[in-house]
Image: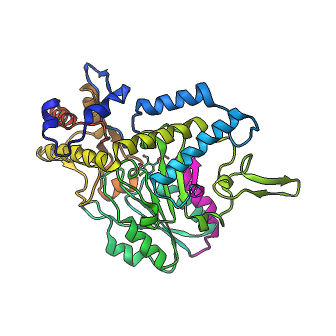
Amino acid sequence: MINSEKLSKTNFNVDAIRADFPILHQQMNGHDLVFLDTGASAQKPKQVIEAMVSVMQSDYANVHRGVYSLSQRSTDLFEASREKVARFINAPDEDSVVFTRGATEAINLVAFSYGQRLVPGDEILTTEIEHHSNIVPWQMIAERQGAKVVFAPITDDGELDMEAVRALITNRTKIVAAAHVSNTMGTVLPIKELARLAHRVGAVMIADGCQAAPHLPVDVQDLNVDFYAFSSHKVYGPTGIGVLYGRPDILIDMPPYQGGGEMIETVEKTGSTFKLPPHRFEAGTPAIIEAVGLGAAIDYITSVGIEAAGAHETEVCAHAETLLRSMPEVEILGRPNSKTSVLSFNVKGAHAHDVGTILDQQGVAIRAGQHCAQTVMDRFGLHATARASFGMYNTLAEAEALARAVSKTIEIFG
Ligand SMILES: Cc1ncc(COP(=O)(O)O)c(C=O)c1O
């Protein structure tokens, strides 16, 4: 393992990072665990685990409600996490950061709140590269409002076909929804340009940042998006919490998504009035412990440096790609110019699930299936792929372990 790291050009201290992730130091099926499924969910550093234990042991009470000191302390920690998120994505202020259950809920919030203004004939432009969570909510609200979902195509290389996009964004387009980074091929989409094209026709732009926030610096003001969604569990934080950034002047005009406690100003038998954003969109007791965990995860990424981590992950992914591309029996999905740390592939003659199982027997944990991206599978005429995805804790040696395990799979399938 050590020798491979000498090849690294990024000088990233991956050993120090690995020491922070207790789960990585175990054997799986008689081999060192090689965890290559960070795209589905990242592992957690001890700093996140400790912050969550600490709030439960010393600072926990319900937030925004208590007049007593412990509740105030808990509220301060919860709101401090919102400020950390705002800084992490360069939001103009913390009130533009809504805590949700995850990226999926964040996109649903925009669909079912902002989407209420759609009228028959309006169009929502999404793309063939999306995760289902950036397709299905749009189909649901389009059906309800009599609007239409239009899909921008992707090229054979796995990039967004921008010529087609330019033709598809018209005066009928009211919402443009696209992934910042593809969860199947790692393609980085030109979100800033998409936002420009959307704004030119008066549409809003929502970026699904699930696979971008863990790997790239995100600046929502520079991207000039109206909405940006991501999940805590993919940025080394806990499950159960995610983020919706919304442009303040848009959020303020949006109706609540759910009703309940915490989000109201007054409740009378004749009706209720609602708080200002973000609280208007946070009905019920929020994920308090998880918010603290997310704050700790952001502190962790910031202390490592997202650029340094991203460069390291790209290097490890590229090493794996070079090794797999040298095997004639392996087919790799897409060849985008600009990509992050996701690699989808198939071994000729083998089902992706069998590849995943054989790799697991060698301690290599990858994902196999459609990756909640059926439109991508359809585009390439596939049923499934094997997918390796990389985090800041992966090593060049692990990329080599993946390649060895794939070679073994090829041997088994003859
Ligand atoms: C690109 C993308 N969007 C959205 C999601 C959904 O995230 P969550 O299940 O955390 O809501 C995922 C999860 O894999 C994803 O990769």
The C terminus sits in image quarter: top left
Foreground: 406 or 377?
406
Asked if residue 374 is positioned above or below residue 62 in the image, the reply reads: below
- Assign the N terminus to one quadrant of the image: top left
The answer to whether residue 251 is left or right of residue 315 is right
Q: Specify the segment rendered in magenta.
A: 95-121
Q: Is residue 101 magenta?
A: yes
Colour scheme shown: rainbow
Across and down, in percent, residue 94 comes to: 57, 55
Q: Is residue 280 above or below residue 253?
A: above
Residue 133 appears anywhere in the view:
no
Tell me how many marks there are: 0
Furthest residue in direction front, as rendered: 69
Q: Residue at x 55, y 53 (%)?
A: 106
Residue 141 placement, left or right of 171: right
What residue is rendered at 28% in x and 65% in y?
Answer: 155
Residue 388 versus residue 6: which sits nearer the camera?
Answer: 6
For the stretch drawn in magenta, what is the main secondary structure? helix
Q: Is residue 64 among the parts visible in the rendering?
A: yes
**Quadrant of residue 197 in the image?**
bottom left
- 309 with respect to 49 (left or right): left
Which x, y percent locates residue 75? 65, 41
Q: Is residue 338 above or below residue 388?
A: below
Q: Is residue 108 left or right of residue 402?
A: right
**Residue 255 magenta:** no
Report x, y in % for residue 18.
Answer: 31, 31
Q: Residue furthest right?
A: 269
Choose between 359 and 297: the one closer to the eye: 297
Residue placed most toward the observer, 57 or 361: 57
Q: Position of residue 363 (x, y in %)?
A: 27, 26
